[in-house]
Image (spheres, rainbow, N blue to C red):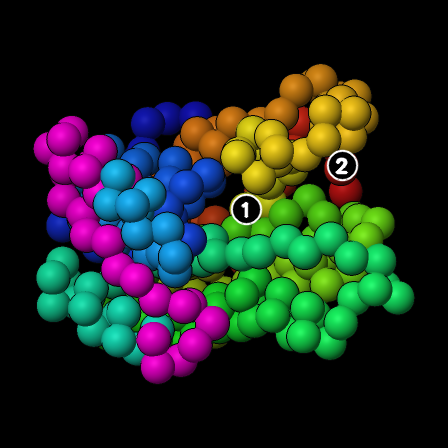
């Protein structure tokens, strides 16, 4: 894959960017020249560390606290980003939570919260930035889904439902905004070596890795690499698509 074009003068907002995949994406976009807003909810120190890493490398970044599933907080976040960096050109909907519950143990509150953080957040953040992207004639939206939104996963009816919804959201939105220079795509990671995955009990983690054809976890930087390409001008013809990076765990 050719090196993506620079993102100089572009403003990127990455939700859930204080650690893991979101952190790697924020760092990668800053490396390409974007000014990056690092969204977080509760991990202020981690978000500040991402900002400091970007600035230490000569980039521009700010940390912005907001619950991406709450409209008032999203609107305030978008206004803050616009005031400090400029209007959002690139939106990475990465905020998410995973609650593992069998269906008979899953509460309505669990289900509602999972849908809100993983799916509603994408709707709210996207709705807030799309008008400006359309007006300027350029925009990139990448929604982070999951292999478990493609194939389902035992004990995750809530999470798999939310992540499957991301695919439908992406395809429908892509048709609405394509004519105005805005692309919308989904990236569906498999099991990635984030703190959350590595915290899984060793015996379960061993089973997970053994089921992956390439016999390893993915790295956050591998997800960030494809996101970096999708937001570049080289990917202008890619929209409404899902890019699966799962080591061969799901081929469909």
The reply to whether the magenta stretch includes residue 60 is yes
Left or right of 249: which side holds 131? Answer: left
- Where does the C terminus fall, quadrant-wise? top right
Q: CA distance from mark 1 to mark 2?
A: 14 Å
| Residue shown at the point (20%, 73%) measured from the top left | 79
Q: Say if residue 59 shows up in the picture.
A: yes
Tell me which corner region of the image, top left, top right, bottom left or bottom right, holds residue 163: bottom right
What is the total number of numbered labels drawn onto the structure image? 2
Q: Please state, as top left, top right, bottom left or bottom right, where the N terminus lies in the image.
A: top left
Instruction: Name the outermost residue toward the bottom.
Output: 72
Q: Helix, strand, or loop for circle 2?
A: loop
Pinpoint residue 162: horizontal percent, then vertical percent. 66, 63
Side of 230 relative to 76 (left or right): right
Res 12 visible: no
Name the one closer to the observer, 89 or 224: 224
* Above or below for 3 versus 17: above
Label 2, residues with CA under 10 Å away: few <14, some 14-19, many ≥20: few
Q: Is residue 94 magenta?
A: no
Residue 28 position in % (x across, y down): 32, 35
Viewer-proximal residue among 193 and 171: 193
Marks 1 and 2 in Cβ contact (< 8 Å): no
Q: Residue at x 24, y 53 (%)?
A: 63
Instruction: Please give the range of residues in magenta.
Output: 50-73
According to the picture, the residue beneath numbered tag 2 turns out to be 251
User: How far from the left and from the top, in percent, is residue 240?
Assistant: 54, 58
Query: In this rendering, is residue 128 above or below 93?
Result: below
Q: Circle 1 sits on which residue?
A: 187
């Amino acid at each position: 894959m050719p090196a993506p074009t620079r993102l100089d003068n572009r403003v990127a907002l990455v939700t859930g960017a204080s650690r893991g995949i979101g952190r790697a994406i924020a760092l990668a976009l800053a490396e390409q020249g974007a000014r990056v807003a690092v969204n977080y909810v509760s991990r202020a120190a981690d978000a500040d560390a991402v900002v400091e890493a970007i600035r230490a490398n000569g980039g521009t970044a700010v940390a912005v606290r907001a619950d991406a599933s709450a409209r008032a907080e999203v609107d305030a976040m978008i206004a803050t980003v616009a005031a400090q960096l400029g209007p959002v050109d690139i939106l990475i909907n990465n905020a998410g939570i995973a609650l593992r519950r069998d269906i008979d143990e899953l509460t309505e509150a669990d289900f509602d919260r999972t849908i809100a953080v993983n799916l509603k957040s994408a709707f709210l953040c996207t709705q807030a930035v799309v008008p400006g992207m359309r007006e300027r004639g350029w925009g990139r939206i990448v929604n982070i889904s999951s292999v478990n939104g493609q194939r389902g996963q035992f004990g995750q009816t809530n999470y798999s439902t939310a992540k499957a919804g991301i695919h439908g959201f992406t395809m429908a939105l892509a048709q609405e905004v394509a004519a105005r220079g805005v692309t919308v795509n989904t990236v569906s990671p498999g099991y990635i070596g984030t703190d959350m995955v590595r915290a899984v009990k060793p015996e379960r983690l061993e089973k997970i890795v053994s089921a992956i054809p390439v016999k390893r976890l993915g790295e956050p930087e591998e997800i960030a690499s494809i996101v970096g390409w999708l937001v570049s001008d080289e990917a202008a013809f890619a929209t409404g698509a899902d890019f699966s990076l799962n080591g061969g765990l799901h081929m469909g």
